[in-house]
Image (cartoon, helix red, strand yellow):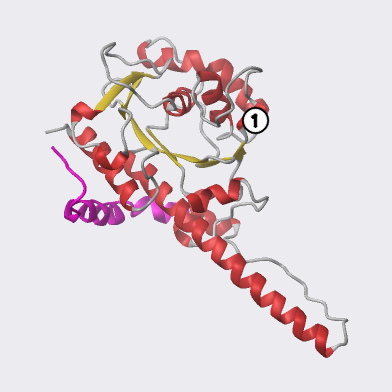
Amino acid sequence: MASPNLHDLIVANHILHHHSVADAYGHISLRNPSNPATFFLSHSVAPALVSCASDIIEYRIEDASPVDPQAGNGYKERFIHSEVMKRYPSVNSVVHSHAESVVVYGIAGVEMKPCFHMAGFLGNHVPIFDIANHYPRHATRDLLVSTAPLGAALAVHFSHSASYASRGLAAGASIISSFTSPESTSTPELQPDHTVVLMRGHGFTTIGSSVKEAVFRAIYTQQNANMQSTALMVRNAALNATFIAKATKEEGKGKVVDEGPQYLNEQELSGCRQQGEKTIERPWGLWVREVEKSGLYELK
């Protein structure tokens, strides 16, 4: 039987698949509670098929190399996890997803906005990472974050500004050393300003202080994307019908002012985020039961 921490990580893989946040692809990691300079991530397998501790590989955050040289094949994009954790010591779990409903907001030129109370964690801006701006000259342009520099470039987008991120790049090595050196106390810990980063033509990455929080954010990011797309379609259909009606009535002089959907305001963002953080155990308990009762997932 896996330890309690690895148990949650395995179950999280099942939950993400059950809620269509992951399919054959996608992954979730956990910073090692006993050694914050390493993290756990399953080997290269579909999330639904992760079933036991032997499916999990321990990696060094410093360079995403496996602690055990004999470990099996890992995900090519493990650098997403290592570089985000390297930059932000408060991040203990990372989810990467290709959810279709979220990919749309990385390519459509429409900004993702928090639509309902479960998505207050999105904040008033969800940044987009465009990997095309970061490829080395002769790299294969497959959109995969498969190197440390690309992972670091993605991690930058969890901060507000490039200058802030630059300080993070410079401080990355000292942050990792501070985990093992009691004397290293002069470098302040960088904190992420965003909880979700969209990835153009690829998917999204979200973070959490725990596996449960990262899963919560991943699932409700997807739900928010579905809700926003529906709201935009309904609004556009209604505006089009109103415009036609007014144009017909006023002989072609119809005019409709579109103020857009009503998203969460600043005060609501803060209150909703705090409320969500307090109640994570409620949906987690439901999600665990759902995958326990499914015939697909195994937990050994």
> Percent from the top left, x then y, of residue 221?
47, 51
Q: Is 3 displayed left or right of 263 in the figure?
A: left
| Magenta highlight on residue 56 | no
Q: Residue at x 38, y 27 (%)?
A: 75
Q: Nearer the viewer, residue 80 or 139?
A: 139
Q: Main secondary structure of the magenta part?
A: helix
Instruction: From this view, report whether residue 80 is shown above or below residue 61.
Output: below
Q: Which residues are magenta?
A: 272-300
Is 166 situated left or right of 185 in this image?
right
Q: Quadrant of residue 5?
A: top left
Q: Is residue 206 above or below residue 220?
A: above
Label 1: element kind: helix
In the image, residue 1 lies at what x, y percent?
Answer: 11, 33
Can see residue 193? Answer: yes
| Displayed quadrant of residue 182 | top left
Q: Nearer the viewer, residue 172 or 21?
A: 21
Crowd class of label 1 (few under 14; some 14 to 19; many from 20; radius 10 Å): few
Screen quadrant of the C terminus: top left
Tell me: residue 41, above or below residue 226.
above
**Residue where numbered disc 1 is placed:** 132
Whole-percent x and y of residue 218?
A: 42, 47
